Amino acid sequence: GDSVTQMEGPVTLSEEAFLTINCTYTATGYPSLFWYVQYPGEGLQLLLKATKADDKGSNKGFEATYRKETTSFHLEKGSVQVSDSAVYFCALSAGGSQGNLIFGKGTKLSVKP
Amino acid sequence: DAGITQSPRHKVTETGTPVTLRCHQTENHRYMYWYRQDPGHGLRLIHYSYGVKDTDKGEVSDGYSVSRSKTEDFLLTLESATSSQTSVYFCAISAFPGQGNSPLHFGNGTRLTVT
């Protein structure tokens, strides 16, 4: 079945460092891909999405490109801030009419000043 | 932010007792979902609803039931809570799930501890 694999954390970076969180997927068909962010004590918030191959999603300095040839959707940010400390989830649309998403296990990011 | 309220936010209960979690939305979205979040597992779908009185099972539905008597409310019931159901439960809603590119909007979660 469909699945998402993302790099295990935790990831610890210094402020202004470059961030990459790897995400690969297995899916039949052509799923839409998403990155969600979860701050402590809160629910998940949509960070960005891409709906077809070669699309680039971007938001708040974060970017991810839908690579069909490598079945990947890696999250990147050029200069992280302490406020980016959170758990990041990669997800894909399950297809069909039910609309649910299939999530990776999450990657915890800690940014030190 | 999507208008989603989960209650209670925290709950401690004993093994064998019934527990009901509530999700209330003000967006009038047709689709609603219950997920559980556990370390090392990410989020897993428990049940979902595609309309009033229309529900279906997700990946980890054993031990859970749901009901949706009104568009705005989606209830998750643990008939007889077990320690393995200690988790954080999230409700989500979706506006256009059939399009495949519609994101889910999440509530702030309910932390349930079964002792």
Image (tube, helix red, strand yellow):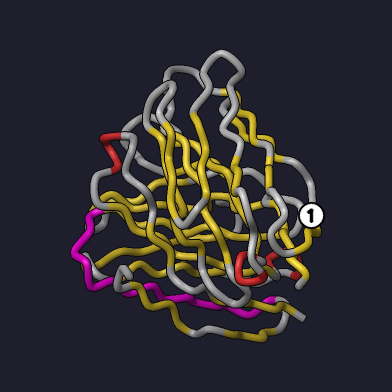
Residue at figure coordinates x 33%, y 70% from the top left: B1
Q: Say what amino acid the circle numbered 1 marks.
A: Val
Of residues B18 and A10, the one nearer the viewer is: A10
- Give the farthest residue toward the left: B28
Question: Residue B12 vs residue B57: left or right?
Answer: right
From the top left corner, tell me how far across and down residue A80 is, in percent.
64, 59
Of residues A36 and B99, the one nearer the viewer is: A36
Chain ID of residue with mark 1: A
From the top left corner, tell me how far across and down residue B111 is, in percent.
62, 77
- Which secondary structure, mark 1? strand
Residue at figure coordinates x 62%, y 69% from the top left: B88
For residue A42, above or below residue B35? below
Kindly identify which residue carries mark 1.
Answer: A11
Q: Residue B6: within the magenta? A: no
From the top left corner, tell me how far across and down residue B106 is, in percent.
43, 63
* The residue stretch that appears in magenta: B16-30
